[in-house]
Image (cartoon, rainbow, N blue to C red):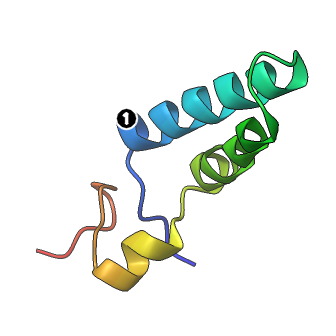
């Protein structure tokens, strides 16, 4: 798996995932808040399957010229 997420993309995913999980854990939102695990995991891994399937790459180190 090559990294296909850039720094800003990763940071936003980690933040959004963390917020959703925190809201779900405190009961502010319903069960769907636990779906924040997905953006959190993709942000931490730096790899996103839909991006790979669509040929999207926001990582400046692995872009094709």
**Residue 31 to residue 25: above or below:** below
Query: Which residue in the protein does label 1 denote?
Result: 8
Q: Position of residue 43 (x, y in %)?
A: 58, 47
29 or 20, which lies in front? Answer: 29
23 or 48, which lies in front? Answer: 23
- Which secondary structure, mark 1? helix
Q: Is residue 19 left or right of residue 61?
A: right
**Residue 4 to residue 5: above or below:** below
Quarter that holds the C terminus: bottom left
Q: Is residue 37 left or right of residue 49?
A: right
**Residue 25 to residue 62: above or below:** above
Q: Position of residue 10 (x, y in %)?
A: 49, 42
Quarter that holds the N terminus: bottom right
User: In the image as oriented, which residue stretches furthest toward the front?
Assistant: 30
12 or 23, which lies in front? Answer: 23
User: In the image as oriented, which residue stretches furthest toward the left?
Assistant: 65
Residue at 38% x, 48% y is 6
Q: Position of residue 41 (x, y in %)?
A: 69, 52
User: In the image as oriented, which residue stretches furthest toward the bottom?
Assistant: 53
**Residue 58 to residue 56: above or below:** above
* Total tally of numbered discs in the picture: 1
- In the rendered image, which quarter is residue 27 located in? top right
Q: Residues within 10 Å of mark 1 (few under 14, many from 20)?
A: few
Residue at 28% x, 79% y is 55
Q: Is residue 58 left or right of residue 26?
A: left
Residue at 66% x, 22% y is 19
Residue at 56% x, 30% y is 16
């Amino acid at each position: 798996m090559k990294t296909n997420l850039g720094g800003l993309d990763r940071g936003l995913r980690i933040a959004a995932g963390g917020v959703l999980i925190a809201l779900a854990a405190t009961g502010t939102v319903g069960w769907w808040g636990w779906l924040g695990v997905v953006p959190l995991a993709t942000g931490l891994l730096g790899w996103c399957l839909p991006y790979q399937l669509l040929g999207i790459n926001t990582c400046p180190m692995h872009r094709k010229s």
